[in-house]
Amino acid sequence: MLMLYVVLLRYIRSLAEVEAHLEAHRDYLYRQFGAGRFIASGPQEPRQGGVILARAPSREALLGWLAEDPFSQAGVAAFEVVAFHATLRASELPASLAPDSAAVPRLAA
């Protein structure tokens, strides 16, 4: 069973150092999306890091994937991983994203 994870990236070096690795980081993200591991990602606001929504068979597997991130390899970001079991989801989200969750329909306006 795949577990859902929120990954919080916090920049620990200057933004200039982070940006030097941004293209490689984006290439890494595209590979993870292509492999079906990542669901959504983007920068935090204000820009002090980023957020990744991922699914993985285990925390250990996810940590292995994150170790391949150029931000991790260059030491420009720290990662915090939060696991959660989705029990509810918006009805417009596919059940495949959280197979054990119940869809909650939108109320009519």
Image (spheres, rainbow, N blue to C red):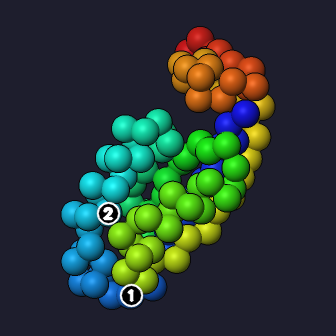
Image quarter of residue 18: bottom left
Label 1: element kind:
loop
Report if residue 93 is visible in the image.
Answer: yes
Q: Is mark 2 on a helix, strand or loop?
A: helix
The x, y position of residue 87, in whole percent, is 77, 31
Q: In which quarter of the image is the C terminus?
A: top right
Q: Name the residue under label 2.
A: 25
Viewer-closest of 31 and 18:
31
Q: Which amino acid does label 1 sit on?
A: Arg
* Closer to the camera in the image, 14 or 38: 38
Residue 48 visible? The answer is no
Q: Residue at horizontal 75%, vertical 25%?
A: 100
* Count of number-bearing discs: 2
Q: Is residue 7 above or below residue 53?
A: below
Nearer-N-terminus badge (1/2)? 1
Q: Where residue 13 appears, x then y in whole percent?
A: 38, 87
Q: Which mark is nearer the camera, 1 or 2?
A: 2
Residue in the picture at 44% in, 64% down: 68
CA distance for labels 1 and 2: 15 Å
In the rendered structure, the answer to whether residue 42 lies left or right of residue 5 reads left
- Identify the residue at horizontal 52%, vertical 77% (top origin): 78
Position of residue 80 measured from the top left corner of the image (x, y, whole percent): 61, 68
User: Which is more toward the observer, 90 or 73?
Assistant: 73
Q: Do the residues labelled 1 and 2 touch (CB within 8 Å)?
A: no
Q: In this view, does 49 lie above or below 16?
A: above
Q: In this view, does 35 lie to the left or right of 87?
A: left
Residue under numbered circle 1: 13
- Asked where in the image residue 57 lies, by quadrant, the reply is top right
The quarter of the picture where the N terminus appears is top right
